[in-house]
Image (tube, grey):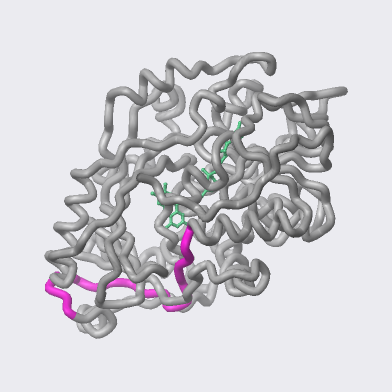
Amino acid sequence: MAPLILPVHTSAELPAATTVAIIGGGIVGLTAALTLAERGVPVTVLEKGRIAGEQSSRNLGWIRKMGRDRADIPLSLESDRLWATMPERLGADIGYRRAGIMYLARTEAEMAGHRNWLASVRDLDLDSRLLAPAEIDRLVPGGAGRWVGGIHTPSDGRAEPTLASSAVARAALTKGAVIVEDCAVRTLSTAAGRVCGVVTERGEIRCDQVLLAGGVWSRRFLGNLGLSLPALPLVASVARTAPMDGPTEIAVGAPDFSFRKRHDGGYTITQRGALVAPLMLDHLLIGHRYLSTLRAQWKNVRISLGRDLLRDLSLGRRWSGDRASPFELVRTLDPPVNDALNAEALRNLALAWPIFKDVVIRQAWAGMIDVTPDSLPVISPVAALPGLTIASGFSGHGFGTSPAAGQLAADLVTGASPIVDPDPYRFDRF
Ligand SMILES: Cc1cc2nc3c(=O)[nH]c(=O)nc-3n(C[C@H](O)[C@H](O)[C@H](O)COP(=O)(O)OP(=O)(O)OC[C@H]3O[C@@H](n4cnc5c(N)ncnc54)[C@H](O)[C@@H]3O)c2cc1C
């Protein structure tokens, strides 16, 4: 069962008009809405299912700079700054803790990867540093694993995805945003070559600007408009333990497991070294764009061929605004949990830290991630369709950067000075 977010009192009414319509009530759309509402811009979020029902409630809650592409570090640094202000800004404890993140290496080749990343960001003045095995034992006691070394970033952290998403939504509502759930946007209305509204399953809303923050659905939405956003789906499975004494507050990522302390006293655990690629038509259409990443990561990807392909084909790729769209057919994407992967993660973790040997698993879930060929999101206006901005393709690490990503999207939509240079996130880079 997927994690539930605290209920938020959203609107049953659809406004006739708004200034900015946001498609998608995940953490990115919600943070953009909060930023716009704080600036006094009328904004309406339209969510086909429940807010944060997809990736934004299912993620691990890691907030990291470590391991990111160098081009993504400015957005991460701004996000760190914003996360620290969130409890006051939202009036809620969202479990944000700057408890640090550590990656471990079993082999020299893995250690070289950490060393190379550190060298690539040397001039950015991060607090990341390489660890010797004895330092790992000191920071995370009780271990039985054999590590060549690791890397640690004390200023990285975590927050609770469910608490954060609902608190951002509530704060946006308080500031005047409108959020409508169970309301899929089928397509856009245009006039004189620019966007002038959204066509929802409950009727049309006129607007000046549209922000598409639809997660894994953005590619399909854009495809119907004749635009191609390269993003392929990957599925990760996660398990949550009952509250327990654990070895550390630091979030730890080994090659074949990860764990991080939760606000409720348990741990969130995953098989960090395995993601499932459910084969779909898009793998044939744009899979070649991922070949270089795949060459480096092929050991981590497990192909699954089955019902996802049939579901994908049955959803269709072209539709008009007066017919039910794929977004109404799948209110909340809830991929099946891969119990074998969760069991692998628990086994590997218990071998490395025996305190996890007899953990009680309280919940397991899976989530589908939208991955771009360069693993950077698109946060960008669309030149071919004035009035449309995209914020999607966060490639499995968009929770951590969501405060600044949402703000950047809001900046771009309103023409405000951008919080960071948006160049790395251009749509036309593909
Ligand atoms: C298992 C897992 C672990 C992860 N771990 C981490 C982590 O530790 N740290 C990290 O930084 N990131 C992590 N991520 C990634 C992170 O969760 C995402 O990058 C982030 O949540 C993306 O937010 P979003 O708002 O773009 O997308 P989503 O949360 O997917 O939201 C998109 C929303 O748009 C809605 N929507 C789509 N199309 C329409 C439409 N046409 N009309 C109306 N609504 C629509 C969907 O229903 C959905 O609710 C993880 C992801 C998963 C799945």
- The answer to whether residue 316 is left or right of residue 359 is right
Position of the C terminus by quadrant: top right
- The image shows residue 366, relative to residue 150, as above or below, that is above
- The answer to whether residue 93 is left or right of residue 143 is right
Magenta stretch: includes residue 358? no
Which quadrant would residue 262 be assigned to in this image? Answer: bottom left
| Residue 86 percent across, percent down from the top left | 62, 69
Magenta stretch: includes residue 151? yes
Name the residue at 41% across, 51% down: 3
- The image shows residue 288, relative to residue 257, as above or below, that is above
- The answer to whether residue 21 is left or right of residue 398 is right
Which residue is at the far right? 192
First to last magenta residue range: 142-161
| Residue 113 percent across, percent down from the top left | 32, 61
- The answer to whether residue 180 is left or right of residue 345 is right
Name the residue at 63% across, 14% down: 323
- Viewer-proximal residue among 358 and 121: 358
Does residue 103 appear anywhere in the picture? no
Name the residue at 82% across, 31% down: 206
Name the residue at 54% across, 60% down: 164
Position of the N terminus by quadrant: top left
Does residue 42 appear anywhere in the picture? yes
Which quadrant would residue 388 be assigned to in this image? Answer: top right
- The image shows residue 96, relative to residue 425, as above or below, that is below
| Residue 380 percent across, percent down from the top left | 68, 44
Tag count: 0
| Residue 154 percent across, percent down from the top left | 42, 78
